[in-house]
Image (cartoon, grey):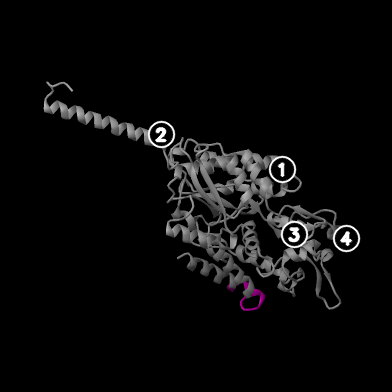
Amino acid sequence: MPKNLTQKQIIIIGGGVVLVIIIAVIVFLSIRTPNGNGAGGAANLTIWGTDNERAFDDLIQSYSGPGSGSQSQIKYVQIDPAQYQTKLLAALAAGTGPDIFEVPNRDLSQWQSVATPVPATLATTFNQVTLQNDFPDVVSQDLESGGYIYALPLSIDTLAMIYNKDLFNTAGIATIPSTWEGLEADIPQLRVTNAQGQITQAALALGGSEASIPNAPDIVFLLMMQNGVQMTSADGSTVAFSSGAGGNGTSGINAFDFYLQFANAADSNYTWNDGMGTALQSFTQGKTAVIFDYSSALAEIAATAPFLNYGVAAMPQPANASVAVNYAKYNGLAVSRDSANITAAWNFVISLTTSAADENIYVKDTGAPPALRSVIAADLGNPTMSVFAAQALTARSWHESNSEQFDSIMNTAIVNVLNGAADSTTALTQAQNAMNSAGD
């Protein structure tokens, strides 16, 4: 250093050198982004879900979006569905939760406080317009809140009518009914009773509680929505399906009574009771002509009764319906607000769920119906999945504070009517009150 520099000049030069070093370090760290939050950094992510490991291992292997590469560490952990919610809540509370986790489509409000929406920095990559263009309407209804997108799905499942072809053929029914009224008309031909008047072959597995029909609450909710019932108040703050609430008049109770009639021994449409075993088991044994279930039931039917001659038809609609209404049940992939890899996690979720190639990998590995409109269009010609694919376009659901709790409450209402503890109006009103209290 020249000897003629003053002390002040030396201090200025030294400060400049330090500043250059600091800037260089900041630039280096921003490029390196070890936590995976930068567009070019490695993605170090943990995903929790209930799907089989093979599906996600294949998806992880195929991922080539932002944050992918040899340094990336993306790990999927399969959790038993029966323990999933308990384990996830405990892990999130302890700060040891995953970066990405599954959210049931009806439960966004329950998980919204621990999830983070698509970051504003990715708005040009994915936004509300992209969401509506890429997915059926039900996805934005379920997984968007306040203009923010909180999760994205790989699959959308819906309730469908699964029927025994041999029993329909034997009964001389050549055309599968598309309406509830048409299905009611077929009950006398499909129902078989013995000399004591006991049902030996059920026409439909309908009217029972979860003890025999695990999807009973879902079917009741679907019937309500098909009957024009507004499930909640206008602002979504309260449940409002009961008679007289939310401007529904008697629509809610009419739908509830319609469901219950099939398990009422005094009704002409009586064809089912909780003593007949589970609906799926009875169906695979050839003792029930029709059940209403999700696509996930097909694997069990194939495993339990591989030679059963069955078909899948669209869920019946009311005869006077101008618009089809179907019932959706699926999971969306959400990103934890406590993740150290938020941008990397959302890059992964967006890439995964909006890629037709990845969607096809998932559908092939799991047997689940697709969620992307482009893959749905391709599957409309698939004899096995076409019904589920098409129904995703007209699927609906409704926001609940806790779907498991609400299902339990509705099941209690069904049981109370079946065992004579309450009439249907009282039981439904009690169910609505219980759901509103549960949300407090």
Q: Nearer the viewer, mark 3 or mark 4?
A: 4
Q: Nearer the viewer, mark 2 or mark 3?
A: 2
Residue placed under numbered mark 1 in the picture: 380
Q: Nearer the viewer, mark 3 or mark 1?
A: 1
Q: Which of 320 and 397 lies nearest the eye of the viewer?
A: 397
Is 420 situated left or right of 406 in this image?
A: right
Q: Amino acid at mark 2?
A: Ile
The residue at the point 54 percent across, 48 percent down is 75
Q: Nearer the viewer, mark 4 or mark 2?
A: 2
Label 1 or label 2, whichever comes before in sequence order: 2
Q: CA distance from mark 3 to mark 4?
A: 21 Å
* Contact? badges 4 and 1 (CB < 8 Å): no
Q: Amino acid at mark 4?
A: Thr
Label 2 or label 3, whichever comes before in sequence order: 2
Quarter of the figure with the N terminus = top left
Q: Secondary structure at mark 4?
A: helix
The residue at the point 45 percent across, 45 percent down is 342
* Contact? badges 1 and 2 (CB < 8 Å): no
Residue 203 seen: yes
Residue 181: give its label.
Answer: 3
Q: Secondary structure at mark 2?
A: helix
Q: Amino acid at mark 1?
A: Leu
Q: CA distance from mark 1 to mark 2?
A: 45 Å
The residue at the point 78 percent across, 58 percent down is 163
Label 3 or label 1, whichever comes before in sequence order: 3
Label 3 or label 4, whichever comes before in sequence order: 4
Q: Which of 7 and 80 lies nearest the eye of the viewer?
A: 7
Residue 31: give its label.
Answer: 2
* Chain part drawn in magenta: 417-426
Residue 88: give its label.
Answer: none
Residue placed under numbered mark 4 in the picture: 170
Number of numbered callouts drawn: 4
